Amino acid sequence: MKEARPRRIRQISCMTLLIFAAVLIAVMPGGSGAVVHAGPGGTIAGNPSGDDGKDGPKGTVWVLNRDRGELTIFDAETGVVVRTLGVGTGAHDICISERTGKAYITAEADNVVKTVDTETLVTDSIPVGPLPHHIEPSHDGRKIFVTLASHPMGPGPAPGTPAYATIDTEDNSVTYTTTSDNPAARSHAVFPTPDGDRVFVAHDTGNEVSGVDVETGHIFLSVWPILRAEEVVATRFGDQLWVSARGEGTVKRIDIATQAVTATVTVGSVLSGPESIMLTPNERTLVVSMRGTPATLGFVDTVHEALIGTLPIAGANTFGDLAVMTNNGHFVYATWDAGSGGFGGVAVVDVRSRTIVASWPFPTKGRPHGIWYSNKKPRF
């Protein structure tokens, strides 16, 4: 007969198993994990939810203050502020063309796209209007796509027509392309496909998602009503779209061939205001920034068409803004604000464990909004 182990040893063994299980839950993808807040100067690497390689994400995070018309550049690993500079009234959204080595910023109230050299920080202006809003580069960096008049300032109808502007990065020339057959629609956000042949457009005003052939300007897709269609992203093979419907607190999947909505996932309410949507490289998770209060991110399982959960990224009386994902899908940088008279910040979220791994306070009052990640270290 085998002798029973002493009770003391069994208790230690059970405790060891419990500790191991707790650690496993904290680090496994999809686990609740521990929330770790690393302020500026504390690196993202070494947090319990994993990192990019051993040192965390490298490069810079570029964030706009829409109230002050300023750009603040953070070190992507530490959150240290590298530089702050003025970029124009109503600075709203930003993207970077690594090909040209320039950041492109919509200065909505000035009717220009401001450029910032990523090495010298020298600025220039390209007239684009009316009311340039969201902005995206083509995958080869040769073109910059800009939506127009999505949210008109003041009373009266939105100016212009349903269209996006295209900036040729070689000579800064600007052309305009119609995005809808509905004259009352206005483009809100664009998504260019990797091959550069097509652009998908979400219309907040007009409640429509459309697809445009870049070369011919032919509108080959029109799906509506998508209440307050905010942002749209295509799957890798270009056969499906995901779109955030801010007007009903959902995200929807659209089959491009049939132009039918094939899935609807509730991520909040109308007050939650889903906006930025980002697909992980394996396309199994859709991350959604919520414009409601408190500032929150949502996570959608695209395979099972269900909400995995939500993650508040800031405290009470804060509001969500825009977000951007690193190229490997491991991290999301999300802006949040505390109103035009308060101080906002940037939350760094590990997508795999759905935990906050850093929180960076914004250096000035006003609402942080547009945000872009570059994997290149600053040279200025």
Image (cartoon, rainbow, N blue to C red):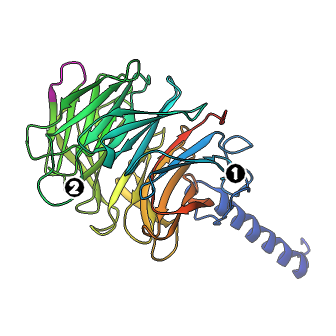
Please name the amino acid that badge 1 sits on: Thr
Where 300 sits versus 326, above or below? Answer: below
Where 22 sits versus 57, above or below? Answer: below
- Predominant secondary structure, magenta span: loop
Q: In the rendered image, which residue does mark 1 sit on?
A: 78
Residue 269's disc is none
Q: In the rendered image, which residue does mark 2 sit on?
A: 228
Mark pair 1, 2: CA separation: 36 Å
Q: Is residue 218 magenta?
A: yes
Q: Is residue 299 visible?
A: no
Tag in front: 1 or 2: 1
Q: Report the magenta residues as a range.
A: 214-219
Residue 127 location in percent, x, y?
Answer: 31, 33
Q: Earlier in the sequence, mark 1 or mark 2?
A: 1
Please name the amino acid that badge 2 sits on: Arg
Residue 217 location in percent, x, y?
Answer: 18, 24
Residue at left 45%, top 38%? Answer: 95
Residue at left 28%, top 63%? Answer: 249
Q: Is residue 72 left or right of residue 42?
A: left
Q: Is residue 108 left or right of residue 301?
A: left
Q: Is residue 113 visible?
A: yes
Indicate the quadrant containing the N terminus: top left, top right, bottom left or bottom right: bottom right
